[in-house]
Amino acid sequence: MTADLLGAMRAVFVRELLVFWRRSTEVMTALVFFVIVTTLFPLAIGPERRELMLVAPGVLWVAALLATTLSLNHLFASDYQDGSLEQMLMSPYPLSAMVFSKIAAHWVLTGLPLALLSPLLAIQMALPMKAIGTLVGSLLLGTPTLTLIGAVPAALTLGVRGGGVLVSLLVLPLYTPVLIFGAEAVAASAGQGFASVAHLSLLGAFLALALSFAPWASSAALRVSLD
Amino acid sequence: MGEFSSLACVTRLIKLIHKYGAPKRFYELAGTLVPWLAALTAVLMVVGLYLGLFWAPRDYQQGNAYRIMFVHVPNAWMSMMAYVAMAVFAAAGYIWNMRLADILAKVTAPLGASFTLTALVTGSLWGKPMWGTYWVWDARLTSELILFFLYVGYMALQASIDDARRAAHASAILAIVGAVNIPIIHYSVYWWHTLHQPASLTLTNQPKIYISMLIPLILMSLAFTLFYVTMLCVRARSEILWRERNADWVRKLVGSRT
């Protein structure tokens, strides 16, 4: 049974990657959004390197957070429309395991490239070199938490009027702790505060909590939406 | 033996909930309670305000400006209590499929949001003479603002789903997730604040509160708690009428009035 379950989870994971890969524009949208939003800030604030460096951790983290929020709509929507979600619900395996696979695949295609792309934008924003490692690390720890938490509102708003904007309204207040410690970790290693280890540890703790709570909550939410 | 008696106790409780948990029975019960609750709320509020505004002494540092505390603190307190109540009602409705709990959770949300908004507004009015500005990114103000956003999200989700049962269950999950998150948000904001700057200007740093200031504060807290219970009954009654508008007893009730 365990082997079967792992096999099913792997099958869902591979399928998700394949589906997202074939609809790569949707994946790219979030990344391009991340790049463009970050580019807007120097235009609005001015090209002064010292000022950019001061706001860089916050700007990069807010942009990453908004890009993740934007991509949440693709997490369940197409599977909801074509009925695949109902098939998953009827399969003999726990729905939360299937949801976990979906979330993992979604993160691999949105959060991971976002974290890998961030050093380029960090250089644009005049973030000191020593802080770039922390930026990538904090995004690698933080974006999976964002996707996990975001899966719950994404599941709740399936087939609901104005679902897209509603997701952001529901999810952004829940994102504040991750934002605080993510941006603070980067700012700390850019030399504006304490050491960043404490912040990164807290981000790790949030990830552990979200891993244990979110797949279960979002599968409960899916059951309500598919009812 | 003890297990058996506690089981009997739970069964009894469930029977009691079933008796008054039926929307019709609750409608009648709340109808008889509302005038008493409203009267008690009014008396407590008048006495509390009088004592707070006239009887309590001037603060030697803050002058008369501190008196806004008698409205601010009860509202801040109720804003958090209402969220807890909402999450508990929502969870009960979700787990046991209780329609009354769904209704109570739904009508708590706008009440909680208005408590939160009042706490924010009175807080910044107090902040102007004390801090010299209407808004400071104080840890408490910030977490109160995020609490307000959580209420708004809950109400938006409720409003965008037409089917009452689905709306109740979906928003129940949101309320529970929010309730798990609130302590995390609160401590995150608190730590964020203390990392940025020392907490030099908070309400807690006032000198120890005098008994003559404490009595009106307690009275006002009681008054606002009762105000919440009263409004909960009033709003739940109208929500019940709306949901049961096709039931015989509502038709009779409305017919007998017109």
Image (cartoon, helix red, strand yellow):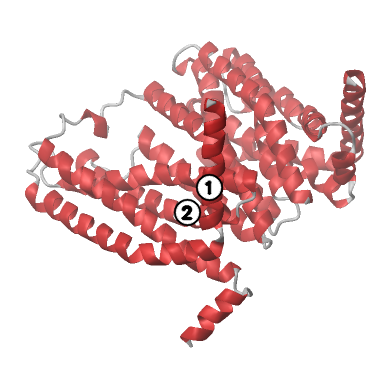
Give x and y (percent) for residue A110.
76, 32
Graded by Cα atoms within 10 Å as few (under 14), some (14 to 19) or many (20 or more), the crowding at tag 1 reads: many
Give x and y (percent) for residue A79.
85, 45
Give x and y (percent) for residue A190.
52, 17
Which residue does the image show at 43% across and 55% down from the upper left?
B111
The three-letter amino acid code for the residue at tag 1 is Phe
Query: Earlier along the polypeptide chain: callout 1 or callout 2?
Result: 1
The three-letter amino acid code for the residue at tag 2 is Thr
Q: In which quadrant is the N terminus of chain A drawn? A: top right
Left or right of B76: which side holds B40?
left
Q: To which quarter of the image does residue A210 belong? A: top right
Residue farthest along the bottom direction in this orientation: B258
Which residue does the image show at 16% across and 42% down from the upper left?
B215
Residue farthest along the front direction in this orientation: B1
Relative to A176, say whether A170 is above or below. Answer: below
Residue located beneath label 2 in the image: B108
Q: Secondary structure at mark 2?
A: helix
Q: To which quarter of the image does residue B156 belong? A: bottom right
Q: Which mark is residue A139?
A: none
Which residue does the image show at 39% across and 48% down from the upper left?
B116
Is the residue under label 2 in contact with that under label 1 (CB below 8 Å)? Answer: yes
User: Which residue is nearer to you in this view: B134 or B58?
Assistant: B58
Give x and y (percent) for residue B186.
44, 32
Q: CA distance from mark 1 to mark 2?
A: 9 Å
Q: To which quarter of the image does residue A39 belong? A: top right
Residue located beneath label 1 in the image: B89
Left or right of B27: which side holds B114?
left
Graded by Cα atoms within 10 Å as few (under 14), some (14 to 19) or many (20 or more), the crowding at tag 2 reads: many
* Callout in the foreground (1, 2): 1
Marked residue chain, label 2 = B
User: Which residue is nearer to you in this view: A187 or A71?
Assistant: A71
Q: Secondary structure at mark 1?
A: helix
